[in-house]
């Protein structure tokens, strides 16, 4: 089974993403770090003791990998927005086998005390136009969420607007039990996150 882990908010540049999200949430983002294997960098915000979200962008100072970057960031343009969500699993190989074709192959990564395996699609694009979750397995006890100061922001709903809603529901059904994740029929694929903040609800 999968467990919701975090959300990826993509931006054309990290400074722009930070400005946009901080303005929307009224909360300062916390330091994240760099992903040398992918040529990206991020900033973070707590969703509580077990969940968080990241604002992520291509790092212009770093070389990219020999394949497209994760979250299809090589092709990202426009407004800062939620583009992906990530679920953790106890066995990434088993999770990949149970997931739709194209979810990716595992990359072993680390930053400081954090060590994880992530399924990265060879073309950078996750199934269902990016609406299927990226898969992650954390190794050891270290996880970003409890290291972040709790700002009181929580995920209320994750709305997956899909042109192929029935098939997406069927793919997620055996793998995830989380009432906050809602699949909605739509003409265009997009992800909407409804967050509760100390100053009220915000939709990203």
Image (cartoon, rainbow, N blue to C red):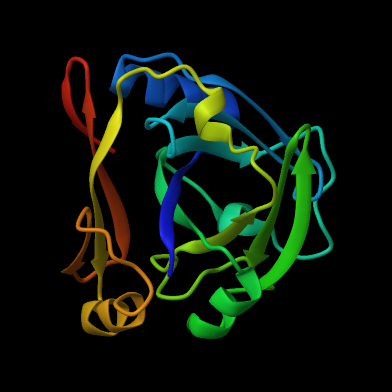
Q: Nearer the viewer, residue 201 or 78?
A: 201
Q: Quadrant of residue 104?
A: bottom right
Count the marks: how many? Answer: 0
Residue 169 is left or right of residue 142, and the answer is left
Q: Is residue 121 visible?
A: no
Q: Position of residue 51 (x, y in %)?
A: 43, 39
Q: Is residue 67 above or below residue 13?
A: below
Q: Which quarter shows the C terminus?
A: top left
Which residue: 44% across, 14% down?
A: 28
Q: Nearer the viewer, residue 117 or 44?
A: 117
Q: Quadrant of residue 137?
A: bottom right
Residue 133 is left or right of residue 104, and the answer is left
Which residue: 65% across, 60% down?
A: 118
Q: Nearer the viewer, residue 92 or 188?
A: 92
Which residue: 43% across, 28% down?
A: 46
Q: Position of residue 135 (x, y in %)?
A: 55, 63
Q: Is residue 64 visible?
A: yes
Q: Which quarter shows the N terminus?
A: bottom left
Q: Residue furthest front?
A: 141
Q: Position of residue 63 (x, y in %)?
A: 85, 45
Residue 1 is left or right of residue 139, and the answer is left
Q: Nearer the viewer, residue 7 or 55?
A: 7
Q: Position of residue 157 (x, y in %)?
A: 21, 47
Q: Quadrant of residue 142?
A: top right
């Amino acid at each position: 089974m999968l467990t919701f882990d975090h959300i990826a908010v993509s931006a054309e540049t990290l400074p722009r993403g930070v400005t946009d999200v901080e303005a929307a949430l009224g909360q300062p983002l916390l330091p994240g770090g760099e992903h040398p294997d992918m040529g990206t960098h991020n900033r973070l915000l707590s969703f509580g003791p077990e969940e968080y979200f990241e604002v992520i962008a291509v790092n212009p100072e770093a070389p990219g990998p020999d394949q497209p970057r994760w979250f299809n960031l090589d092709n990202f343009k426009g407004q800062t927005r939620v583009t992906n969500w990530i679920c953790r699993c106890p066995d990434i190989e088993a999770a990949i086998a149970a997931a739709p074709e194209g979810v990716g192959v595992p990359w072993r990564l680390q930053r400081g005390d954090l060590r994880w395996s992530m399924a990265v699609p060879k073309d950078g694009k996750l199934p269902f136009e990016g609406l299927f979750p990226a898969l992650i397995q954390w190794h050891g006890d270290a996880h970003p969420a409890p290291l972040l100061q709790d700002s009181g922001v929580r995920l209320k709903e994750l709305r997956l607007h899909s042109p192929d809603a029935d098939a997406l529901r069927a793919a997620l059904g055996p793998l995830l039990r989380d009432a906050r994740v809602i699949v909605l029929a739509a003409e265009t694929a997009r992800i909407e996150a409804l967050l509760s903040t100390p100053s009220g609800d915000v939709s990203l």
